Image: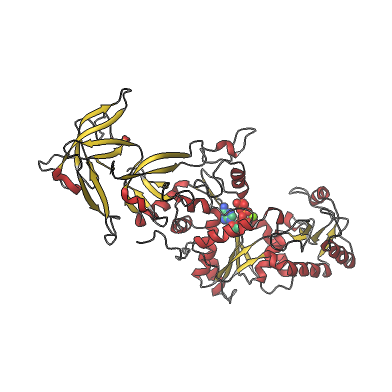
Amino acid sequence: MKKASTPNSKPTQDSANFLKQIIEKDLETKKVTGPIVTRFPPEPNGYLHLGHAKSICLNFGLAADFNGRCHLRFDDTNPETEDVEYVESIKDDVRWLGADWKDHLYFASDYFQQLYDWAEYLIQENKAYVCSLKEEQLREYRGDFMKPGQDSPFRTRSVEENLDLFRRMKAGEFAEGEHVLRAKIDMKSPNMNMRDPLLYRIRKVRHHRTGDAWCIYPMYDYAHPLSDAIEHVTHSICTLEFQDHRPFYDWCIENLPVPAKPKQYEFARMNMTYLVMSKRKLLQLVKEGLVMGWDDPRMPTISGMRRRGYTPECLQLFAKRIGVAKAESLIDFEILEGCVRDTLDEVSHRAMAVLNPIKVVIDNLPENHREEIQTARHPKKPELEKRILPFTKEVYIDAADFMENPPSDFFRLAPGKEVRLRNAYVIKCKEVVKDAAGNIEKLICDYDVATLGGKPTQDGRKVKGIVHWVSATECIEAEVRLFDRLFSVADPDIVSEGKDFKSNLNPNSLKVITKAKLELGLRDASQNIRYQFERVGYFALDSVDSKPNNIIFNQVVELATGH
Ligand code: ATP
Ligand code: MG
């Protein structure tokens, strides 16, 4: 059987992408002569989300387009919040997306010694100094957008004193917050990032890779450009909020004897309606038990979307469709769902599942009638082995496909009316049987033997409606999880006073159907296959909870409206 996803397909970028044009020009003008090198630099402090997926497709896609390479680099300069659990999940997610870093897996922490040596170099060049202002004073001296900064009284320390203090910082002689190392640039700069930014701070925290080897850690803004340079990255692509950091990025590259001169380019961060996309907020949902975990199928995490049943191709198509922009973009959740549908339609096996069953008894069939109806697994893939649908005296249809007192435009089953059972026969409802409480117990119908598999009625009667069904005696029972949006408003960050984004969680985002009736063949459903439950939506086995004796399907996405 064919797999629904091909994990080795590569992300690519289309030519409308402005970054692609920059690279083309850089090659044309010989500004870059070697291979094109990009990188995806996650901080291992949470699970990857849709925004990261876009960045992965972008960086690995550009590298592939230019026959270059893309590095996976963990920006692990912040030991407090980082963890190996995150490192492993990130690797797993990147690989799943089809991105291949080959042997270019790096960690900023591998460069700690080099970064330290370069810090000493800056001190020796009189371009960095140890500052002993307390945190609050540091902020005060920095000024703000209106007010220029003020030189620190420690700015004039001699090179010798700076070197001595910095070495002692490294040796662990001082407490956290006692000293920092700062670049000596310009406290009057209109760009706050150039007002003697911090290079190192003391943190007596164990690092998940370097252990207790260090008690001073480089700042992200210092470590990042230098890591890029060490790896000979040519195009360092980041999100727009780093635009104002670019002058300092360039300052680091210009003022240190680095082996390469990477350039930073910015594109707009992606946000999506009805979701939050910050790791900090996602972590809150997980920690407070408001979702099943990082991989909750409603979460915008890659692991959540995987568990839900999205394939890598869904996210690749999405990244391609939204492209890259220079301006902030808020993407409609429906764009993502459209990509999922378009991707899954081509690969999903068709099946029938009745989520809210009512029983239909076919009166004019003998008690133990059983015939096997063969039908296609996919309308455009005749090469696939046929499905077998047992047709028996008792079947289930969905309660929504029957109405006792239907309006004139209702074309499904009603007393005295006919409907076609998909792939099978036309049936006519003769009688509605109710229990003492007045609930419908079953529908008594007759079937028309001449109408198998879509054949017209012999007397030319028109039967408009087609409904899905399963045999009541030969089906499986399964749990089906239906998902709605995680938040009930388009922008969860807009909240009333005293509330936070969590107050906008959609209380009905998960609906569990415990006893759905599924066509018998789904007994052998596979994690690798996506299913279209006809007339219902796309579904996939829950990769965590589904077991052969307790089958659980997730709704990946509904069918487009109009079905
Ligand atoms: P968050 O704000 O969710 O914590 P982050 O930017 O801090 O995200 P990192 O691990 O530092 O997360 O990001 C790794 C890479 O992914 C960076 O290059 C960043 O620019 C990119 N990235 C993160 N979020 C988005 C997003 N919403 N859209 C596009 N790219 C993103
Ligand atoms: Mg970050």
288 relative to 394 in the view: left or right = right
Residue 205 visible, this angle = yes
Q: Nearer the viewer, residue 279 or 65?
A: 279
Q: Nearer the viewer, residue 418 or 475?
A: 475
Q: Position of residue 14 (x, y in %)?
A: 46, 63
Q: Which quarter of the image is occupied by the C terminus?
A: top left
Q: Is residue 546 above or below residue 163?
A: above
Q: Nearer the viewer, residue 53 or 196?
A: 53
Q: How is the image coloured?
A: secondary structure
Q: Which quarter of the image is occupied by the N terminus?
A: bottom left
Corner quadrant of residue 23: bottom right
Work out which residue is located at the far front of the displayed protein and give it. Answer: 368
Q: Position of residue 284 (x, y in %)?
A: 62, 44
Residue pictured at 52% horizontal, 67% vertical? 100
Residue 20 visible, this angle = no
- For ligand 2, which image quadrant applies? bottom right
Corner quadrant of residue 443: top left
Residue pictured at 31% horizontal, 48% vertical? 520
